[in-house]
């Protein structure tokens, strides 16, 4: 095999084409991985059964018959009372470190 300095431009073309292909493949892979990660995150979220909005942390959500979740905004449009009401908490609720005084 010839050294790179002695190779003609025609001999180096396949390497450039391979580099261009690899350069294009990386952003496509990154986009696909990002889309998969976002899809998994959105699948775990609770959404309002009426408007589809994801309730914010600290907002009250209302549970109706059949397990339907309704956000605070859509609750005002309903006549029937909810079965229960819960506050949306952040994902790390209960996992925080609490300092305690030495006994």
Image (cartoon, rainbow, N blue to C red):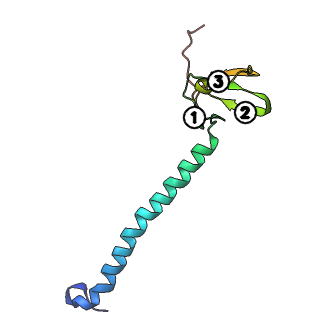
Q: Which residue is mark 2?
A: 68
The Cα–Cα distance between marks 3 and 2, rounded to whole angstroms, is 12 Å
The quarter of the displayed image where residue 91 is located? top right
Q: Mark 3: few, some, or many residues within 10 Å (few <14, many ≥20)?
A: some
Q: Which one is nearer the viewer's eye here, 96 or 67?
A: 67
Q: Which mark is residue 54?
A: 1
Q: Earlier in the sequence, mark 3 or mark 2?
A: 2
Q: Secondary structure at mark 2?
A: loop
- Closer-to-camera residue (40/51): 51
Give whichever of 64, 9 is nearer the camera.
Answer: 64
Give the label on residue 75, or none.
3
Q: Is 37 situated above or below 92?
A: below
Please report the residue visible at 34 percent of the width from the left and 74 percent of the height from the top. Answer: 20
Which is nearer the N-term, disc 2 or disc 1?
1
Q: Are marks 1 and 3 in contact (CB under 8 Å)?
A: no
* Picture quadrant where residue 17 is located: bottom left
């Amino acid at each position: 095999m010839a050294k790179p300095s002695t190779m003609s431009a025609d001999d180096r073309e396949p390497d450039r084409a391979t580099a261009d292909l690899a350069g294009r493949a990386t952003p496509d892979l990154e986009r696909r991985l990002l889309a998969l990660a976002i899809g998994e995150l959105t699948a775990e979220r609770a959404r309002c059964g009426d408007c589809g909005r994801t309730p914010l942390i600290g907002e009250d959500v209302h549970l109706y018959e059949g397990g339907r979740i309704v956000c605070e905004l859509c609750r005002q449009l309903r006549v029937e009372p909810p079965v229960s009401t819960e506050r949306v908490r952040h994902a790390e609720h209960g996992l925080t470190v609490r300092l305690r005084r030495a006994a």
